[in-house]
Amino acid sequence: MNTTGLRVVIDTNIVIAMIGRSSPYRPIFDSIINGEIVLCVTTEILLEYQEILDRKNGIIVSENMMQFFSIHPYVEKIEPFYRFKVIEQEPDDNKFIDCAVAASAYCIISNDKHFSNPKLQDFPKVNVYSANDFMKEFYS
């Protein structure tokens, strides 16, 4: 399947995993770099990316990634106007749902089990792929 123009929201756990050159998820990051995928983000999501990148990858990597997210033409800033509050076990993850709905994104890519909430099958309909499932569907 072709990823051209595919709008996605990527959970922080995947962002951390995809940036390494030898990562099995690197094709996702390369697809953003090459403009095949549009990464949709909000201010809240960017702040979480920065916090976790600082902690796990260091300030230099974090600053480089934040610069990339702020200037790359295939990273789109979204402003959600509604909070769906679908994920009760981990309310902080709702920002990814809100972004996906506001952006009309194809899916959220996450390895977080909170996104397997049955409420996501109803309105608002949000497709959620694990990184492995996304890789199988779009890069096999």
Image: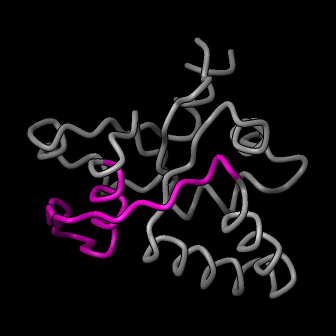
Picture quadrant of residue 12: bottom right
Q: Position of residue 19 (x, y in %)?
A: 78, 56
Q: Position of residue 45 (x, y in %)?
A: 47, 70
Taking the image as shown, residue 22 lies to the left or right of residue 6, namely right
Q: Is residue 133 inside the magenta stretch?
A: no
Residue occupying image coordinates x 57% and y 28%? 5
Picture layout, residue 66 above or below residue 110: below
Residue occupying image coordinates x 64% and y 46%? 74
Say which of 41 and 129 sits in front.
41
Picture layout, residue 122 above or below residue 60: above
Quadrant containing the N terminus is top right
Highlighted magenta segment, given as a residue range: 73-100
Residue occupying image coordinates x 49% and y 38%? 7
Picture quadrant of residue 126: top left
Picture quadrant of residue 104: top left
Say which of 23 and 105 sits in front.
105
